[in-house]
Amino acid sequence: MTIPAPTPGIATPGTAVLLVNLGTPQAPTAAAVKRYLGEFLSDPFVVQIPKLLWWPLLHGLILPLRAPRVAHKYAEVWLPEGSPLAVHTQRLAGALQARLPDVAVLHAMRYGEPALRERLRELRAGGVRRVLVLPLYPQYSMTTTGTVADLVARASDAPEARVVQDYATDAGWVEAVAASIRAHWQAHGRGERLLFSFHGLPQRLVDAGDPYAAQCEASVAEIARALALAPEDYVLAYQSRFGRERWLGPATDATVRALAAAGVRTLDVVCPGFAADCLETLEEIALQNAGFFRDAGGSALRYIPCLNDAPAHADALAALARRELAAWPVAGA
Ligand SMILES: C=CC1=C(C)c2cc3[nH]c(cc4nc(cc5[nH]c(cc1n2)c(C)c5CCC(=O)O)C(CCC(=O)O)=C4C)c(C)c3C=C
Ligand SMILES: [Fe+2]
Ligand SMILES: [Fe+2]
């Protein structure tokens, strides 16, 4: 880890910005997926089943059955440099560092490597006194941002920390997403319909007060406004259901099939809940759901990539970080 020498500027010396993403396996193999999913699905913020019931089910049934199947899917989207989620997250941190020369910009993962817990320890040991933690989830959920904030709050040997809660309607981020959609239309022509697909969540959590669904709706409303879309131009759906209980709806796969059955031939899909392309976008949307659409009579599902390390994305997040740091009073200053 290199921490830049203190220079006068927007931030006090000893300040860092830490981008945090979910995490991903180290390799597209069943063993690596088992290790990663084991940690992820053992987090009580993600799965709320009592440990005594969940543990045997997870380790006896779910991981042995799911890991080989999911490893095969990872292999289909794996990049020469590694897992797409890891590669794009690391590149985004680099792009942010170039825009914030006065602070150290690093990335970490909530599950797997580089571990958030370890990063916080390293920052403190490296002389960083304040860290702005920026979870790469535009919309807040207790299962994502919530568990990052919980780990940060419990980390005793960490710098003083602030956690960005969400940026679902941040003007810079909204414009970056809208610009990526415009660029896609420019390159490929405009599809008959635009589908906004977000990662799903158990309905039970939304009913208990998780603001995630409301924030997804707010993001869509702002992006639609930026693009001057009419209500009939677009739809919102939720993907990646896991387990048997009811999840937020409508489901992306059912929506894609219904649109094709209703006569839509070209469908554009964007996933504004994901900062970086990953298994859920590159495999589930661009491969699997594209197949569902064709099988139901559609001609082409055209996937619009995540913002990844696009300049407009890095600009928006750098501006967000600058604002957060400027609003953070320095003790004794
Ligand atoms: C109870 C299960 C899950 C909840 C709740 C959940 C919420 C949630 N997840 C993301 C973002 C990502 N999830 C990803 C993969 C993934 N998610 C789950 C389960 C839950 N997610 C599983 C089991 C998996 C692994 C893949 C699989 O086995 O199907 C990823 C991709 C990771 C990668 O390596 O590419 C992301 C990103 C959000 C935003 C969210 C709540 C809003
Ligand atoms: Fe997930
Ligand atoms: Fe999935």
Image (cartoon, rainbow, N blue to C red):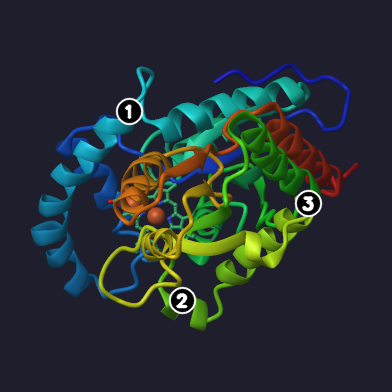
**Sooner in the amino-acid sequence: mark 2 or mark 3:** 2
Is the distance from the Cβ of mark 2 to the nearest ligand 1 atom less than 8 Å? yes
Q: Which residue is mark 2?
A: 205
Q: Is residue 15 visible?
A: no
Cα distance in 3D space between marks 2 and 1: 32 Å
Crowd band around label 1 with a 10 angstrom C-alpha radius: few (<14), some (14–19), many (20+): some
Please, what secondary structure does the residue beneath circle 2 have? helix
The picture places residue 259, in percent across and down from the top left corner, at 45, 62
User: Which residue is the site of mark 3?
Assistant: 226
Residue sitting at the far front: 263
**For the residue marked with disc 2, what is the amino acid?**
Leu
> Is tag 1's residue or tag 3's residue first in the polypeptide sequence?
1
Residue sitting at 26 percent across and 75 percent down? Answer: 50
Give the residue type at disc 1: Trp
Q: Nearer the viewer, residue 147 or 139?
A: 139
The residues bearing labels 1 and 3 have C-alpha atoms spaced at a distance of 33 Å
Q: Quadrant of residue 5?
A: top right
Amino acid type of the residue that numbered disc 3 sits on in the rendered structure? Ala
Q: Which-is-in-front pick, marks 2 and 3?
A: 3
Residue that extends furthest to the bottom in the rendered view of this protein: 207
- Indicate whether 179 appears above or below 229: above
**Residue at mark 2 to residue at mark 3: CA–CA distance:** 30 Å
**Residue topped by disc 1:** 78
Image position, residue 29 (x, y; %): 18, 33
Q: Is residue 295 above or below residue 316?
A: below
